Image (spheres, rainbow, N blue to C red):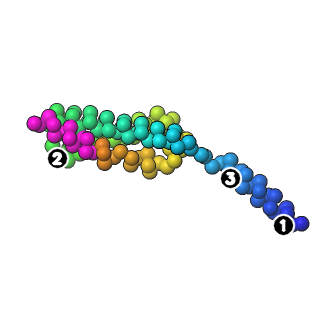
Amino acid sequence: MAGQGNSSSSDKKSKEVMNDVSTFRAENLQNNMKVVYYSRTFLSIIGGAISGILGLTGCMGFILYFIVMAITSIGLIAKAKFSLHSYFDCWNRFILDGFLGGLMSFVLFWTYPFL
């Protein structure tokens, strides 16, 4: 009898855990990541052009890139109402996605005004 009582309580606990686990639709998650990637790429291009126009060279240009990416991340987090787990499966993916692609776009448009 004690075994049955324990199994029903464990069934209740597993149902509660299943209710707490959030599920994501793949299409929505993919769309959210696409928006993050496009936003980072667009702002990297704008930041690179501004850096080139201002004539920033060396480390100052890369510092501007990191500032632009930090502002972009804060803006996207604010857009998500500071609830990343409602829109993304993990925060690492949100923070790092598009970072290197954005860097390449930044450098391309950073050096373009010098030509």
Task: Give x and y (percent) for residue 40.
Answer: 35, 39
Q: Where is residue 55 in the image (x, y as percent from the top left)?
A: 14, 37
What is the C-alpha distance between the residues marked 1 and 3? 21 Å
Above or below, comparing residue 34 to residue 92 in the picture: above
Mark 2: which amino acid?
Answer: Gly
Residue 3's mark?
Answer: 1
Residue that sits furthest to the front in the current view: 27
- Would residue 92 appear left or right of 24 to someone viewing this image? left
| Amino acid type shown at disc 1 | Gly
Query: Closer to us: mark 1 or mark 2?
Result: 1
Which circle's residue, 1 or 2, is located before the other in the chain? 1
Residue at 68% over, 51% down: 18
Disc 3 crowd rating (10 Å Cα; few below 14, some 14-19, many 20+) is few
At 77% from the left and 54% from the top, the residue drawn is 12
Disc 2 marks which residue?
58
How far is disc 2 from disc 3 in space, using C-alphas?
A: 51 Å
The residue at the far right in this view is 1
Figure quadrant of residue 25: top right
User: What are the residue bounds of the magenta stretch?
Assistant: 103-115
Image-based side of 50 in relation to 11, left or right: left
Is residue 114 a member of the stretch shown in magenta? Answer: yes
Q: Which residue is drawn at 89% across and 66% down?
A: 1
| Residue position marked by numbered label 3 in the rendering | 17
Decide which of tag 2 and tag 3 comes sooner along the chain: 3
Q: What label sits on residue 34 in the rendered view?
A: none
The location of residue 64, given as percent across then percent down, is 25, 41
